[in-house]
Image (cartoon, rainbow, N blue to C red):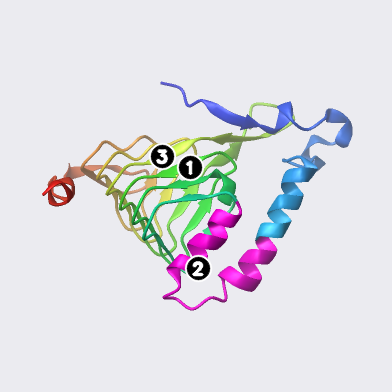
Amino acid sequence: MPREIHYNAAEHISANTARDPYLRPAFPLRLRLRRLMWNVCWSLLYRTSPRPLHSWRSFLLRSFGASMGPKCHFYPASRVWAPWNLICAEQVTAADGAEIYNPAPITLGSHAILSQDAYLCGATHDYDDPAFPLIAFAMSLGAYSWICARASVAPGVSVGEGAVLGLGSVATRNLEPWTVYAGVPAVKVKERRRHATDVVAG
């Protein structure tokens, strides 16, 4: 099933902006200004906040449009490209160095974890188009999924409930629920025992 493009810069940026398409901005001015304000907030208030103040960082993300469930743990050195495109259920964790590049919406299910330096990449460029426009995809990580340290999820890839992407691995295709993946590109290694939802249900 082909991945559905959520945002295509070619549909939003006029060709008159620059003769050389590689010099055209990828986003409209209003979005670039919104990003500037968020980057200032991240630098001054988010990044400098003490590690235990998870509720404060959730508040800052909500202030810029994020949907944050209760008890989310986003650490000070985690990065969210566009809070207004972030949807989190309860108890989502983003460790220091974890980065969510989300020009399109990214949804994180209950108890999803992004370990240190994990990277969710929500956009790429259409290299078959001479204009080389940025294209972005909506993505989702299921409940109890875990993206291990320094692992990356490619644009448009969905991570199933309870799936695990191992240390330093790169997911280029959808990850099946309750399955462990490892490698570059990531391949299925084994099944994961389904226990987390049973604990909650009990």
Is the C-beta separation of discs 3 and 1 under 8 Å?
A: yes
Q: Mainly helix, strand or loop, the magenta region? A: helix
Q: Which residue is mark 1?
A: 106
Q: Amino acid at mark 1?
A: Ile
- The structure residue drawn at horizontal position 72% and vertical position 40%, both measured from the top left corner, is 26
Q: Residue at x 44, y 68 (%)?
A: 54
What element does badge 2 sit on? Answer: helix
Query: Measured from the top left, where is residue 52 in percent x and y?
Result: 41, 75
Please provide percent x and percent y for residue 20.
84, 36
48 in magenta: yes
Which numbered dot is residue 74? none
**105 magenta-colored:** no
User: What's the mark number on residue 56?
Assistant: 2
- Is 22 situated left or right of 65 in this image? right
Start and end of the magenta stretch? Answer: 39-64
Tag 3 residue: 140
Residue 27 versus residue 81 in the image, above or below: above
Q: CA distance from mark 1 to mark 2?
A: 21 Å
